[in-house]
Image: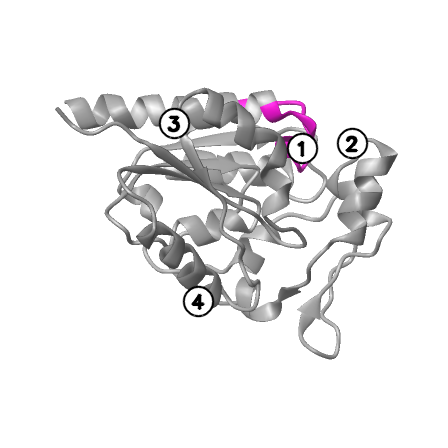
Amino acid sequence: MASKISTAVLVHGAWADGSSWGSVIGSLRAAGLNVVVPQLPLTSLADDVAALERTLERVDGPVVLVGHAYGGAVIAEARSDKVQSLAYVAAIAPDEGETVAQVFGRAPPHPQAPPLAPDTHGLVWLPLEAFGRAVAPNASDELQAQLAAVQRPIALACITTPVGRPRWKDVPAWYLVAEQDRMILRDTQEFMAMRMGATIVSHPVDHVPSLTAPELVTYTILAAVRTAEGELAC
């Protein structure tokens, strides 16, 4: 009998770190999964994929890879045989030869979305007010302020590098569409999810459901695990 998925590896997006998964970790562990959260340097797509691969080297057994926002591009570049399933949480999913920026910009931005431009170091920061207006409008004022205070910039090399053959072409994928997302529009998320043939969960949540709707994120991840285990057992 095939081994069951034992570990969820949760990959954060831009302007964030692994703490953005804090509200999901406990519920996944309660469901019997080990949880590992790599910290991406956000310096280039290659650097971020390398950080993920180093994390996967330390994990025993089959894995479900979970990506939020930019993290979706990173998880699709992982080549470890341990990866048996993917779960996308309002995540970017470029096809082969595309860049994150191309997919992100395929539609006009939401009126509340901030303008994005690099500073003199080639790093993109969010204006502080963007966390309340666009990133986490469903969060408390306190949480919005915390997200703004700890934000980490993302380098242009992360979002302008074409990706290789995405892993979602080879393993089952689930996609949580955030219907109220003001950063990655619902239409763009649905386009990516349908293109990859993912099983879609769609709910009226904002861009960071791991913080504002953690039960829904947990459900999506566990569903991705069950789907992959069913296919492994065939």
Q: Are marks 2 and 1 in contact (CB under 8 Å)?
A: yes
Measure how far apart labels 4 and 1 are at the Cα level. 27 Å
In the image, what residue occupies the spot 12% across and 24% down? 1
Tag nearer the camera, 1 or 3: 1
Secondary element at tag 3: helix
Indicate the quadrant where residue 233 lies: top left
- The magenta stretch is 201-214
Q: Secondary structure at mark 2?
A: loop
Rounded to the nearest angstrom, the CA distance separating label 3 from label 4 is: 26 Å
Label 3 vs 2, first from the N-terminus: 2
Look at mark 1 in the image and give the residue it sits on.
Answer: 211
Q: Residue furthest bottom?
A: 120
CA gap, disc 3 to disc 2?
Answer: 26 Å
Q: What is the quadrant of residue 154 in the picture?
A: bottom right
Contact flag, marks 3 and 4 (Cβ < 8 Å)? no
Are discs 2 and 4 less than 8 Å apart at CB?
Answer: no
Dot placed on the residue nearer the N-terminal end, 2 or 1:
2
Q: Position of residue 159 (x, y in %)?
A: 55, 62
Q: Secondary structure at mark 1?
A: helix
Label 2 sits on residue: 139
The earlier-in-sequence mark between 4 and 1 is 4
Give the residue at x 68% y 70%.
Answer: 123
Count residues near mark 4 (Cα–Cα under 10 Å), then give few for <14, some for 14-19, many for 20+.
some
**Separation of disc 2 and disc 1 at Cα?**
8 Å
Q: Position of residue 83 (x, y in %)?
A: 30, 42
Q: Which residue is the site of mark 3?
A: 224
Amino acid type indicated by mark 2:
Ala
**Residue 78 in magenta?**
no
Judged from the image, the secondary structure of the residue bearing numbered disc 4 is helix
Q: Which residue is mark 4?
A: 46
